Amino acid sequence: MLSDKEIYSLLTTEPEKGTAKIMKQYMAFVYTIVYGKLSGITSRQEIEECVSDIFYEVYRTRNSIDLEKGSLKAYLAVLSKRRAVDLFRKLSKKAGEISTNDFDHEWLTSGDDVEKSVIDGEISELLLSEIKALGEPDSQIIIRKYYLGQSTKIISKALGLKPNTVDKKVSRALVKLKQALGGAI
């Protein structure tokens, strides 16, 4: 097993060999992360494609990897979580159905700085807990609007509500969330 510095050196001097080495060493790790986030949501083939895309991105952005900020394993973990979230969002928009249970605080943290990630994770967990407490359809509307970036028009069509009803529910839900979180949003 090569060290991160050895793999990175190989990745920058001989990109194909370096990519092969990083895949050999971390394939199971990356696959486990992506599979854990997307199993039951999409096919095994799409999960494998997502994993391939992750290693392609490592190859493509190899010169911008900074080992001073963390290990290759940490870099791959963050990249894997982000790509899994991207695929989840893409599939959710296609399916038109989103459950608030499909989100967890790990998906919302960046992982760039451990302390910041822990704090962000706790905040995200609290926020999602309060969003879930709003009940349906309010929680789904908030997730669609603020996490997935869907427009009022798209949300209203997906949920069978009038656009002005969606806007009113968003406004009321934000007031409830602000009260529940002590004015933190």
Image: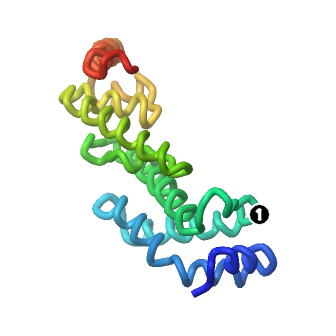
Residue drawn at (32%, 47%) of the image: 104
Residue 162 appears anywhere in the view: no
What's the amino acid at mark 1? Asn
Quadrant in which residue 167 is drawn: top left
**Residue that sits furthest to the right in the current view:** 13
55 up-or-down from 156: above or below:
below
Q: Residue at x 35, y 33 (%)?
A: 143
> Which residue is rendered at x = 31% and y = 40% of the image?
125
Whole-percent x, y for residue 81 in the image = 46, 56
Q: Position of residue 32 (x, y in %)?
A: 39, 71
Give the residue number, with chain letter if any, for mark 1. Answer: 63
Q: Is residue 174 left or right of residue 118?
A: left
| Front residue (pair 94, 127) | 127
At horizontal 45% and vertical 26% (from top left) the residue drawn is: 151
What colouring does the structure picture have? rainbow
How many numbered marks have been drawn onto this rendered protein structure? Answer: 1
In x, y percent, where is residue 51? 51, 69
Find residue 56 and report its horizontal and vertical position in percent. 64, 68
- Of residues 9 and 101, which is closer to you in this image? 9
Quarter of the image with the N terminus is bottom right
How packed is label 1: few (under 14 Cα within 10 Å), some, or many (20 or more)? few
Inspect this view and state whether residue 79 appears.
yes
Which quadrant holds the C terminus?
top left
Q: Is residue 48 above or below residue 101?
A: below
Q: For mark 1, give the secondary structure.
A: helix
Residues 55 and 95: in front is 55
Q: In this view, which residue lies farthest toward the front?
A: 115
